[in-house]
Image (spheres, rainbow, N blue to C red):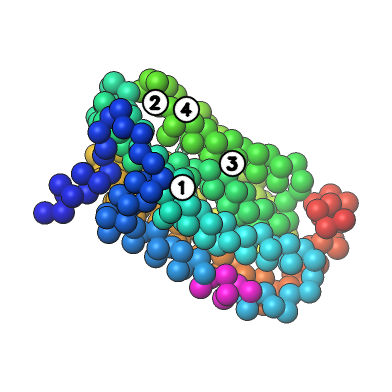
């Protein structure tokens, strides 16, 4: 029953450049979409308070760095969702021929891809520090991850050719493959040496499984094959975000607060190779 309304509010007539107040109004009128933003804003706010509380007594510098990078995740998220809720980082883009919604202007939440370029490196920095990785792997994973987000943004913003949208998508997947390789092959070995295998294993599994959901929903949503409605895609991203960010961050910070000694030993024993970030 709600489908016609959703359609009407997420697909605009072409040739019409919507102003920011108009985009904002469309977001507000699409209750399902708007709720997916505000639920995450509330969650980000609550998480920031909880995380500050969890990290209040952390003294070790490496643990503090894990704490700050983890805290940045909900901080970026709050800003990201405010951008979406205000219509600032949403555009109606006309889809090229070949696309299921060719010729129609589709609501594109490009702000998501942009802010992922800031939040996902923080998740990886925290994970890498936990695994006791070296600077080379940390640099590699973070730059590849940023490249994944920026090329994902390019895929969403390309309106000249349907084929090129998918070309950008594939480039982004190639960067994602490098991130997965480091997460699944390199870091488990480092974590075993560091003595953080248990918690690293849990967080790695959570991360890998949930991160896979993002390219899947991109492909199914309005940006890709358009078999899933924009509001549903937005909720899918919002739910994935809850696991990939808040559950992840909570488990990590709870562990770090209780095992500061393990992280601190890691700094001392690997100084000169892995721990250059503390210098
Ligand atoms: C895109 C589309 C292009 C192909 C690939 C993608 C991957 C996105 C991922 C996003 C993870 C986001 C997280 C956000 C938390 O704040 C850009 C969807 C591979 C993996 C964890």
The answer to whether residue 138 is left or right of residue 80 is right
- Pointer 3 residue: 145
Quick one: quadrant of the C terminus?
bottom right
Foreground: disc 4 or disc 2: 2
- Identity of the residue drawn at 64% across and 42% down: 141
Foreground: disc 1 or disc 4: 1
Please provide percent x and percent y for residue 239.
39, 59
Marks 4 and 3, Cα distance to the nearest angstrom? 14 Å
Marks 2 and 1, Cα distance to the nearest angstrom? 19 Å
Mark 4 / mark 2, whichever is N-terminal: 2
First to last magenta residue range: 46-52
Please provide percent x and percent y for residue 190.
70, 52
Quick one: quadrant of the N terminus?
bottom left
- Identity of the residue drawn at 65% across and 39% down: 143
Disc 4 residue: CB within 8 Å of ligand 1: yes
Mark 2 / mark 3, whichever is N-terminal: 3
The answer to whether residue 69 is left or right of residue 165 is right
Marks 4 and 2, Cα distance to the nearest angstrom? 12 Å
Badge 4 vs badge 2, beta-carbon distance below 8 Å = no
For label 1, count other residues whose C-alpha is less than 10 Å away and answer few (under 14), some (14-19) or many (20+). some
Q: Which numbered tag is attached to residue 146?
A: none
- Identity of the residue drawn at 76% across and 48% down: 134
* Rendered view: 90 above or below 101: below
- Pointer 1 residue: 88
Q: Residue furthest left?
A: 1
Marks 1 and 4, Cα distance to the nearest angstrom? 24 Å
- Pointer 4 residue: 168
Which SS class for mark 4?
helix
Q: Is residue 47 magenta?
A: yes
- Identity of the residue drawn at 57% across and 56% down: 76
- Pointer 2 residue: 159
Which SS class for mark 1?
loop
């Amino acid at each position: 029953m709600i489908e016609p309304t959703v359609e009407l509010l997420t697909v605009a007539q072409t040739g019409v450049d919507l102003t920011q107040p108009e985009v904002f109004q469309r977001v507000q009128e699409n209750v399902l979409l708007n709720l997916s933003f505000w639920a995450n804003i509330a969650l980000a706010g609550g998480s920031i308070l909880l995380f500050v509380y969890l990290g209040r007594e952390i003294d070790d510098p490496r643990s503090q760095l894990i704490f700050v990078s983890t805290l940045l995740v909900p901080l970026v998220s709050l800003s990201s969702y405010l951008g979406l809720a205000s219509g600032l980082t949403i555009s109606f883009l006309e889809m090229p021929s070949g696309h299921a919604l060719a010729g129609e202007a589709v609501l594109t939440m490009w702000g998501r891809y942009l802010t992922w370029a800031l939040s996902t490196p923080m998740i990886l920095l925290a994970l890498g520090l936990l695994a006791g990785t070296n600077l080379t792997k940390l640099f590699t994973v973070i730059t590849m991850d940023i490249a994944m987000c920026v090329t994902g943004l390019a895929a969403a913003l390309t309106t000249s050719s349907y084929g090129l949208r998918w070309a950008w998508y594939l480039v982004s997947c190639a960067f994602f493959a490098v991130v997965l390789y480091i997460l699944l092959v390199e870091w488990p070995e480092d974590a075993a040496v560091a003595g953080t295998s248990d918690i690293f294993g849990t967080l790695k599994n959570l991360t890998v499984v949930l991160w896979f959901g993002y390219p899947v929903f991109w492909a199914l949503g309005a940006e890709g094959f358009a078999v899933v409605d924009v509001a549903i895609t937005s909720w899918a991203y919002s739910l994935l975000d809850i696991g990939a960010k808040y559950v992840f961050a909570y488990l990590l910070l709870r562990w770090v607060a209780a095992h500061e000694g393990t992280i601190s030993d890691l700094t001392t024993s690997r100084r000169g190779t892995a721990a250059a970030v503390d210098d």
